[in-house]
Image (spheres, helix red, strand yellow):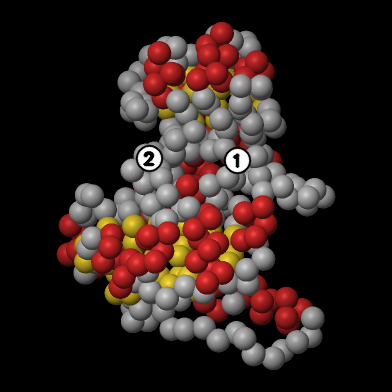
Amino acid sequence: MKVAFFDTHPFERDYFEVQNASHGHQIEYFEPRLTPATASLAVGHTAVCSFANDHLDRDALMRLKDAGVKLVALRSAGFNHVDVGAAREFGIHVVRVPAYSPYAVAEHAVALIMELNRKLHRAYYRVREGNFSLGGLVGFDLHGKTVGVVGTGRIGSAFASIMTGFGCHVVAYDPITNSDLEKRLGVKYVSLLELYSVSDIISLHAPLNPNSHHLIDDAALARMKKGVMLINTGRGALVDTHALIAALKSGHIGFAGLDVYEEEEGIFFQDLSDKVLQDDQLARLLTFPNVFVTAHQGFLTREALTNIAETTLQNITDFEQAKPLINEVKG
């Protein structure tokens, strides 16, 4: 099958080429993101492969339909950037990678915690300049702290397991209770309001939907402990950035570790080092010494990239062979 890959990056192509040896698809790689303006590049392809920050609104999907595209294969778990209803209307199937490596994202969340707590970025640059003083580098023991986990799917569960290994008390919120976490790890499920009020560290692992959009807003931040550490490796729009900046400025929020950002589209995954950053909110976040931002790299491990390639190509093969699409997005 001829497949147009959009928003492709050097770090992922090798993994797809290796896995495609057993599938035999004709892959054409395009650097631009998939948007209404670039959808015409898909002419002559039966399928397109889309990344997390592509923009598949109704207009883009209509253009894909006109180009003869029958399948959108997402090489991501999230699908909030796709108008699934429009895709269904146009007869375009949408498939995704529901799980690749929960450990990759969970471990990155822990890395953000450790980096912020022990101020490793400051220590790194200080030592390189010959400054071996320890002033301003005091952290805290993770052992005995209360960690709140919002969302206990595969990633949130993996994160909870790691934090119990540090000796933390883990509380969680999820509409669906994971009894294994309760029995095996002693995780206690509580309401969101209680989680906000008792947690020293809060880590977000929830999907983005209309109910979770700006889950962390002014009211939620106000209920949190003064000095709390907030980690987001889930979806950028779980956090109201304007409210977070205000809470950081007031000192109510002690630390923020972000691997996602609600306006990351068109910024993350790009080299903008020779340009002026046009996003004022992101620019402001980057000025805080107690904020650490990574560019949506939580998934970036060899194991996760291999799994993403395997599942994406199998999804395409299943469509080509008219097999059941077990990873189809229903809406």
Horizontally, residue 264 falls left or right of residue 92, namely right
Name the residue tied to disc 2. 209
Rate crowding at label 1 as few (under 14), some (14 to 19) or many (20 or more) other CA atoms within 10 Å. Answer: some
Q: Position of residue 111 (x, y in %)?
A: 51, 66
Name the residue tied to disc 1. 265
Horizontally, residue 277 falls left or right of residue 89, namely right
The amino acid marked with disc number 1 is: Glu
Query: 113 or 219, which is in the foreground?
Result: 219
| Residue at 41% over, 45% down | 213
- As helix, strand or loop, the secondary structure at mark 1 comes to loop
Q: Position of residue 21 (x, y in %)?
A: 57, 29
| Residue at 55% over, 86% down | 138
Query: 295 or 245, which is in the foreground?
Result: 245
Q: Position of residue 53 (x, y in %)?
A: 57, 37
- Residue 239 in the image: above or below residue 21: below
Q: Quadrant of residue 44?
A: top right
The amino acid marked with disc number 2 is: Asn
Horizontally, residue 234 falls left or right of residue 150, namely right
